[in-house]
Amino acid sequence: MDKSTLPGPVSIIHSPAAVDAAVRDIAARINADLAALAPVEPPLVICVLTGAIVFTGMLLPHLAFPLELDYLHATRYGSATVGGELRWIARPRNSLKDRVVILVDDILDEGVTLHQIQAHCRAEGASRVLTAVLINKVRPRSLTVPVDYMGLNVPDVYVFGYGMDCSGLWRNAPGVFALHEGISAEVNT
């Protein structure tokens, strides 16, 4: 991909090789934790749409146990730049009762959405809720969000690529990129 086609001045924070290594590391840790469990009770992997679709697709082939796949879509942003109330667009189709659930999300930013999704899974009766996140935005947070498997850190800047968007575009960017200061963009969802 020609970097000149990206939206304005950008910097690459993580290369495709770094992202691939992080995905493989997360998968290895999940495999180690769930190796004994999976043959007895296949976990339910839930992709948090839309941002985690790329990460989920990269992660699944490295998980060495039977699993079921589902998705959910919840957002606090839509096309806004400031988060509001959590709006459910799609809830998981499978029952979560007595299931080990692995939530797969693209980025931990403020953490409010992920915290509410985790609470929803517990309220639906999940026996265990594990969370895998590709990108951790290093920033102060008003609440603690437990993440079992974390990939890569980024500074507190607007990032896109590998599922995260820039004004609805560039989820397919091959790398994790940061927009330079002063560039207008919509919030990652």
Image (spheres, rainbow, N blue to C red):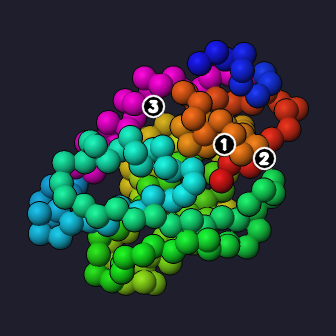
Q: Disc 3 designates what residue?
A: 19
Q: Position of residue 23 (x, y in %)?
A: 38, 38
Please name whichever residue, 142 or 134, is drawn nearer the observer in this view of the structure.
134
What's the magenta region?
10-32
Does the image show residue 61?
yes
Q: Amino acid at mark 2?
A: Glu
Left-right relation of 16 to 187: left
Please name whichever residue, 58 or 33, is drawn nearer the observer in this view of the structure.
58
Confirm whether the magenta stretch covers residue 25.
yes
Instruction: Say if 35 sits above or below 120 in the image.
Output: above
Give neighbour class at mark 1: few <14, some 14-19, many 20+ (Cα, 10 Å): many
Q: Position of residue 185 (x, y in %)?
A: 80, 41
Give neighbour class at mark 3: few <14, some 14-19, many 20+ (Cα, 10 Å): many
Kindly state the secondary structure of the residue where label 3 is placed.
helix
Q: Where is the N terminus found, in terms of image quarters? A: top right
Confirm whether the magenta stretch covers residue 37.
no
Say which of marks 1 and 3 sits in front.
Answer: 1
Does the image show residue 134?
no
Kindly state the secondary structure of the residue where label 1 is placed.
loop
Which label is found at residue 186?
2
- When asked about the image quadrant of residue 9, the answer is top right
CA separation, marks 2 and 1?
8 Å
Q: Position of residue 42 (x, y in %)?
A: 21, 66
CA separation, marks 1 and 3?
16 Å
Discs 2, 1 touching: Cβ within 8 Å: yes
Q: Disc 1 designates what residue?
A: 165
CA separation, marks 2 and 3?
23 Å
